Amino acid sequence: MAAINRDDVAHLAQLAHIEMSDEELDRMATELAVIVDSVKSVSEAAGADVPATSHPIPLTNVMREDVVGHVLTVEEALSGAPDASDGRFKVPAILEES
Amino acid sequence: MSASELIRSSAAVMAAKLAAGEITSVELVQAHLDRIAEIDGGERGIHAFLHVNGEEALAVAADVDARRAAGEELHELAGVPIAIKDLIVTKGQPTTAASKILEGWMSPYDATVIKKIRAARMPMLGKTNLDEFAMGSSTEHSAYGLTRNPWDLDRIPGGSGGGSAAAVASFEAPLALGTDTGGSIRQPGSVTGTVGVKPTYGAVSRYGAIAMASSLDQIGPVSRTVLDSALLQEVIGGYDPQDSTSLTDPSTGLADAARVGNVAGMKIGVIKELHGEGFQAGVENRFNESLELLREAGAEIVEVSCPNFGYALGAYYLIMPSEASSNLAKFDGVRFGARTLPTEGPLTIERVMGATRAAGFGAEVKRRIILGTYALSAGYYDAYYGSAQRVRTLVQRDFEAAFEQVDVLISPTTPTTAFKLGEKLDDPLSMYLQDVATIPANLAGIPGLTLPGGLADEDGLPVGIQLLAPAREDARVYRVGAVLESLLEAKWGGPMLNQAPELATTAVAAEEAN
């Protein structure tokens, strides 16, 4: 398994939408390298014949009646938003102007 | 009974006094609010609470008193106050998850457990401190300051639910709610000398608990006695159609189990891998004493081996960050919480998100998001997340094999007693090792209880004893836990918290600070 380096962390931070300073990237790369190294034994623990467990107590086909349940009003849904307008969330520009 | 004696009672005793008309709920709630005002604030205060909900708590208490006076039949715990971990959403009180990104956020809905607490008419004293988004083992990762351990103000109260545990340990509340993803109820319980239970996965609805790792998270009770936790789990448990992982089993029989009062003929398994090397000597001594008491009470103690537990911590630190990185994607500065604008350059949504999350999340949250993003990324998914899920199967099989031989399993809850504030902040890995004994239960979804097992010889600090049972057999940990508790208390001549130091009033300091 490959070690994690500073460039990896910069790429991951971009994927995770977290801006990071150079200093933060350096520190994070060092810390994550230690953590990743400590968990690498996991990949050797179980053979491919062992099935994966995603939930501890598997339940299947959990359904409910197809009727409208309790839902938030528009006002409630928008009450914690940093910006809203005309009953909708207001967001900054999606695309950069070129 | 004086107010200071009253707040030291168990929730069950408070409930009995309320039912008998010896005290009113208003008196009881006021006594706790006074205690909070006395010791929670100031530089050296416990700081268990992020928000105190005095007005509403007193109004609920007054309503309970009026209903009781009118002869209405009420829930057993009606009028008994409770504190809520600030990871659980509440109407009318802020919910912050101890993160800057949710500073001052008011939830437009109640979590299912909160609805049940309101239905039982239990006054809510306020919201308790935690590691940001429940990520940590010391409550030092809170964006709103640390919480102190009532046994030693320079030590951690555990985490992530350090606030709930410290509130209960310092008699600011008789009961609290916690959440446990890898030990966040049990480890704080262990280091503060209190009781905490992670129920079977799905036994208590997670609807309205801000998710960290959805396949591991579980809400559960925090208290000073085993019976009190059983009573509280009966209030909050049961099927909830709003949580699709909720079990349909009824939430009953737990308090009865805690009242059974014997363990004769039960088989209790000592997990070979969860004591000895790496565990503090004083922890080991208290653990062996508990085994001896259970043996004298007629239980058969046998050793069992869970050989794959050595991989559990590693698997947990892949699964948990993976799920957390996905769950925390919703904090994007659009629908709720803070929005931070970049200081320069174009104002696009992507850059606003990057700036918002940079400013809103603390270091540990960022670390876990990045780690999770890495474990889930193309090319690594199978080696990391996939392998970890296979280890999860192996851990479950270890438990299955163990529970074929024994009724319950036992181990120390944590490898050490409470460490000093700041001691492990710069060493994430050593912080993670705190959860080595608690994590397997989350991976397998089984119930786990911690109760005080005495004080370690070398530092005089609380040691926790953990009991584990098969999934859906929560009653067993309550049964054995209550017996061990009574055996230990008989030996000590009273509850262990009687040995905790008196806390100085910090109220004056608090006023100055305001």
Image (cartoon, rainbow, N blue to C red):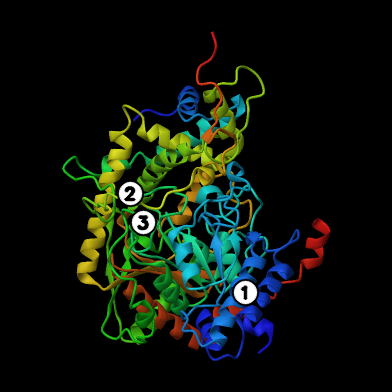
Left or right? Give the position of B271 relative to B97.
Answer: left
- The disc placed on residue B171 is 1
Towards the viewer: A83 or B439: A83
Q: How many marks?
A: 3
How far is the residue under mark 1 from the one under mark 2?
Answer: 38 Å
Label 3 – label 2 distance at C-alpha: 14 Å
Asked which quadrant contains residue B289, the reply is bottom left
Amino acid carrying label 3: it is: Asn
Q: In this view, does A42 lie to the left or right of A82?
A: left
**Discs 1 and 2 carry the same chain letter:** yes
In the picture of the structure, the residue carrying the numbered disc 2 is B311
Q: What residue type is labelled 1?
A: Phe
Regarding residue B283, the answer to whether it shows in the image is no
- Disc 1 vs disc 2: which is toward the camera? 1
Residue B442 - label = 3
Q: Residue furthest front?
A: A86
Q: Horizontal and vertical percent for residue B235?
A: 42, 71
Residue pictured at 54% horizontal, 51% vertical: B107
What percent of the width, then of the height, locates residue B189? Answer: 51, 66
Residue B90 in the image, given as x and y percentages of width and height: 53, 57
Residue A98 in view (yes/no): yes
Q: Give the mark nearer the N terminus: 1 vs 2.
A: 1
Q: Which circle, 3 or 2, is nearer the viewer?
A: 3
- Chain under numbered label 1: B
Asked which secondary structure carries label 2, the reply is: helix
Residues under numbered marks 3 and 2 in contact, where contact means CB atoms less than 8 Å apart: no
Q: Which residue is drawn at 47% across and 77% down?
A: B228
Please give left or right for residue B279 compared with residue B59 in the image: left
Q: Quadrant of the N terminus of chain B?
A: bottom right
Subunit bearing disc 2: B
